Structures are given as structure tokens and as C-alpha cells.
Amino acid sequence: MRRAALALACALLVSILAASAARAEDRIVSKKMWFGERKGKLAVSTSFTELLDQEAYERLSSGFATTIVARIYVYRVGQGEPVSAVMASFRVVYDLWDEVYVVRIDGPQGRRTARVATRADALKELTELWQVPIANLSDIPRGVNHFMAMVVELNPVSKELLAEMRRWLTKPAGSTSIDRSSSFFGSFVSVFVNPKLPEADRVLLFRSQPFYRPVSR
Amino acid sequence: MRWGMAIIAAAVALSLARPAPAQNRAAAEADADASFGPVLVIERIEVDGNRSTAERLIRRALPVHEGDVLRAGDRRLGEAKYKVLALGYFREVDLSLRKGSARGKVVLSVHVVERGTVVLNLLQFGTSRASPWWLGADLTERNFLGTGIGVGGGLLYAAHGDIVGSSNQWAGELRVADQSIAGSTLGVHAGVLFKRASEPYRIDGSPSQGGVDHFRAFDYRRIGGVAGLGVDVTALARLSTDLRVERIRADVPDAPTRTLPDGQVVAVDLPLRPGTSRLVTASVGFDRDTRADPVLPFGGDRLVLVGELGHQLFGSDYDYTRVLARYEHWWPVHGRAHVLAVKLLGGMVLGDPPLFEQLYASDFNRMLTPRAFGLVVSTESAPNYLGTAADEVTYGELGGAAAVEYSYRLFRHRSRIYGGDLFVGAGLWGLTRLHRLNARDRGLYRSLPIDLFFDAGLRLDTEIGIFELTLANAFGRVEL
């Protein structure tokens, strides 16, 4: 029993150390955003240029499509459930022969396609929200504090593809069919070179400043 | 047989009762329009960086080929990198396009960085009253000489303890498999095994008395091989079939008996043919795994079904049917940080199986020391928390377990230690012999030796592999 307790203590220690080192990855970035009312909707303007690092920026010219998916939630301060949720996707591909960037944006305002000449312009199209409707005004009562949270993913990978990529973990080559003996029932411990296969090239989490609709007089 | 069919039906029903895994909505919607981007003709595909892996393996994995005409936004181009990564042979895959020889034509370049493909599948070691120490390991080279063929094997040695008649045990296995013949969904696999076993059996005492004085042991040897085919029926499901042939030589004691605590002497059933016998079986298996992360799962499910038949028509001395089913489902609750899982496991063996093909208590109860490479290395019986005599059965023909597990996401990281989850679980397990149910002096429910088991521990996904540190076996050794 003493050995078991020691093992548990070691495991917990490793976990806590690793957890404390890892928390920085999941940090939510606070961002000042513009909010306004537009055609009966709450609209937001902001940008998330920092999603693309230098490598990702250069890959905009690779000829492969780059996809950004933004999920936007409006919360009432102090509540756990969002009062509104919308999604927007941004795609860009560089036309190697015409040497232009083709951008397609699907969001609450519908679909918009643009062709821009420079990579910088493509980045701007990809990472800027301009007066995008994010909630019905009827869902945002006056005088109540709200905030917006946004999850932005660069080149997200579908769950099916992720499952396919890590499938060999549970079916190591060389095993004979579906194991009948201990491994059918047993737990897993396996040592191998295990590169990280992320769910997206990069994920950022943003939170806006609190805002409210003024009480009308 | 009805029980077996019921187990399979229940597992399939559970699997089908839920809709197909919802694709990542964001990615799906983003990829929905394959008409995006200019039209491209793949004029040529160039591969570099593969020092030992055959180029044809990489080309086969790509969802695009030379001559294909597609839009730049086509999903196949977007997935190409991940399809190559899915081979499991590369640390990095980088794809790029450049202009080809004429307008609209492009050259696709694939740059790969290879990784080590040796996997330590299993490391088993321990100590018990029956065996002072045992040690075993199982290794696989997943990309043997860069051919994509997996070659693996394992070896285990267990020193004998003080049980009268026991001897040292060891087991070895060699395997070879090509999961994808010529890039098709069809795979082939084969293996050989050798096991020298020393099987303990109880001669007196109650189940709680695990001392070696209460046991005798006898030896048997197994040598044989297995060969089969597998086919990917979907990207996440595989169907396989096997033919297994083994020669068994058993030194079964003459008329073994056990003296019960009340003084009654009963015969001990050791189902192995004395001398030399042959085991020939055919089996079919199905495995579907929809978990995006099989190491630290937060959603999806896994279904495994195995049916095996041994019959004299095949030349077997043992006629039996064996059915095993496992279904596990994970749900994120309150975000991905909290995950609930339900784990169901069941099995049934009918007919006249050899001893080692029967269901074993540790197959269902993680608090017991598991068989090491199929060899029994401990004589400890299961805790009997509920007083249902669950500790009396070591081998059985009908068994199952149902568990609920909660795991808490400790952290996720992009380097070295990728993630860790703490987990706690509890469940019910049972194992019995069918004759105990058929010839009973009480109701069916009271005749079922069902008991509790508990588990807790830590799962880690790291750069050097995956680990599960569990306290289940320690819990099993605590006397209440």
C-alpha cells in the first residue's frame, strides 16, 4: 500500500507541474472591440491578425487553401450560457497563375467573395470583422452588462480526420487481427515517438471588454 | 448461444442507437464548397525527405494523384497532409504547390520528416506469491525497412514460486502484418507463438486464502500460428478474420481434487486434453473507433466484437464458440474538461474450450493481476465486497463488466507532455460457470456472482508514448 501511495503522489506531482506549465497555452486574450447596433442586430468590429504567425502568413501564398473559423458567443456577465452564438468562416487561396488571392467569407451576413492582389490585403480580409451582426437586439436587454467571447481556429481538422490520424495507436501494425487475449481487455501503456497532431494549426481565445446597451430615456 | 447473440445484439444496438459522429461543424462548413479556388491540374507529384520509407507508400496515401483535375479549395488537397501523417511514419509533412509546365498545371511537392517507428506496445512486470517475479515486453517495428510492413514480437519470463508442481513460465510471439496491400483497404497478417505455462489450481482452502500451500500446478505447452485478413470497411472501422492452429501438450494431473472448507472433496475440472491435442479455430472480428483522441478521449465511441469457433470439422480437438464484445462511449460534460464514459464488456464461451480460452476473472476485474501474455502469474482471488461469492470463480464461461468512469482534464500542451487526465471509475463485474446457473438452489439473481470494482489513476499522452498509471491493482490488494 505504501508503494501505491508513493506512485499516486509521484503521478500527482508530475501532473501538477505539467499543468502549471501548460496553462499559458489556454490563456484567454482580452481585446478591446467595437460594438454597435445595426439593423436591429448587435454588431461587432474587431480583428485577430495575431492568429497567423510568420510561417502561416507565408503559407497564404502556397497555393493551398487556408481556412479560419471563428465562433462568436455573447454572454450576459455572470451567466454561463451564451445568449447568442454565430459562426464565420474565412478561406483564402492563392491563384498561382493569375497571382491573386481569392477570399471567400461565410458568416452572418451571408457569403462574400473577393479577389485581392497582395498577401497583406488577403490577411486583412481573413482576420477582420467589420460590423458583423452577432445577436438580435431583443436578446440584449438594455442596461445589462454583456461580453463577447470568440474562439478562432486556423485550419481546423475534422474529428473524423483526427481519429483516422491516431487510429494506428489502437491498432498497431503487426498485431494479429483483433486481439483475443489480454490486450482485448487490458489497459494501455505504450512507448513510441509520438508527435503532436493538433486539432488546428492554431487556436486563440478572445474576450471583449464588458459592454451594455444604454437605457433609453 | 442465445446469451452470445444477446451480447452482440446489445453492443450493435448501442453502437447504432446514436447518430454517426457529428463532424467538426466548423471544419465541415468551411470545407463544404469544393468549387472554391482556381482549377488545377496535378501535373507531377514530387516526394522528398523519405530516407527509408518507400515513396510508393506516400503516394498511395495521398488522396490526389498525377493527372487529377480539381479546385485549389478541394477538400482532398486540404486533407493530403493529414492522410500522409495518418501513416504514422512521419513527424512532419509539408506540402507545397508551384507552377507547372503550362497554365493551370501545378507540381505538388511533399516533404516528409521521418520519425522512429518502433513501438513498445507492452511492458509487463510484477511479483506475486505464485511467481516471485515476471518480466515481459512486446515491440513492433511499424515500418519494417521502409516497406510499411509491421514486424513485431514479444517475450515474457515468469519465475516459478513455491507452488508444488510449478515451473518457470515463458511465452514468445512473432508477428508480421501489412495493413494495406498495395494501397488497398485489404490487409494481411500472420504470427507464431510459443507458450510454456504452469497453471495453478486450488486443492483446498477458501477463496480468500491465496497462500501457495493451497495450490498445485501442472504444465502445458502451446505452439502454433495465426494468419488472417483484415479490411477497412470505413475509414474508422475494420473487419478481420483469422485462422488459428495450435498444438498443445499438457501434463494434466490424474483425477485432481479439491477439499472444500467443509471437508467435502470435489473433482477439479482442468479442461485440457492430456498429452498432445490440437486447437484449430476460425474467428471474425469487427472494430470501430470514432474517438478523435484515443489516448485521452473526450467524445466518440469504440465497439469491438470478436466471434471465434473451434470445431472438429477444422481438425480441432476442442469444439467451442467464443463471443466477446466491448462497447465504450465518452461524453464531454460541461465542456471538454469533464468527461464521462460508460464501458461495457461481455463474453461467453460455449462448448468445450481449452482452459486458456475460457474467460478469466482479471479480464473483467481490473483490481486483479492480469494474465501476462496469457500466462497465469497470480493466485489472488477477487475481493468479495458484496458477499456474492464472486471470488470463487477464476475461470468461467459467462462474464461481463459495466463501469462508469469520470475523467478530469488536468492540462493540454503542445510539446513534451501533451496532456494528462485524472480518472476515477467504478463498476460491476461478474464471471460464472454456466452449470452454476443451470443447476442452482436459489434464484437466478442470487446465483450470479456480481461484485464491485474500482479504479483511479492518471493517463498521460507524451512525446515518448502514452501511459496509464492505475491504482486498481493496489485497491485489489487492500484487505477490508
Image: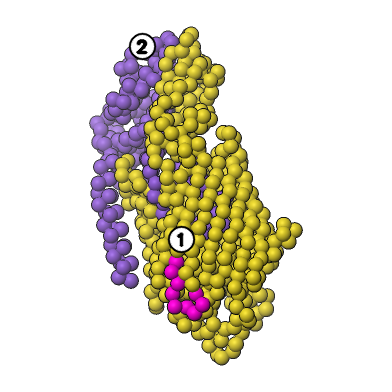
Is B388 placed above or below A128 here? below
How far apart are labels 1 and 2 at the CA level? 65 Å
In the figure, residue A205 lies in which quadrant?
top left
Q: Is residue B224 magenta?
A: no
Instruction: Output the chain of dot 1.
Output: B
Q: Residue at x 61, y 39 (%)?
A: B186
In the picture, measured across the screen, residue A151 lies left or right of residue B271, that is left
**Is A87 in front, or is B33?**
B33
User: Mark on residue A117?
Assistant: 2
Segment tinted magenta in the rendering = B158-166
Secondary structure under the numbered disc 2 in the rendered image: loop
Q: Main secondary structure of the magenta part?
A: loop
Provide residue B343's location: percent of width, then percent of height.
50, 58
**Is A188 in front, or is A96?**
A188
In the figure, residue B129 lies in which quadrant?
bottom left
Residue at image mark 1: B156
**Is B276 in front, or is A179?**
B276
Instruction: Output the chain of dot 2.
Output: A
- Mark 1 vs mark 2: give the one in front: 1
Q: Quadrant of the N terminus of chain A?
A: bottom left
Secondary structure under the numbered disc 1 in the rendered image: strand
Provide residue A71's location: percent of width, then percent of height.
39, 34
Chain A, colour shown: purple
Q: Quadrant of the C terminus of chain A?
A: top left
Q: Are marks 1 and 2 in contact (CB under 8 Å)?
A: no
**Residue lying farthest to the bottom in this orientation:** B263
Chain B, colour shown: yellow
Q: Amino acid at mark 2?
A: Ala
Say if residue B429 shows up in the picture: no
User: Mark on residue B437?
Assistant: none
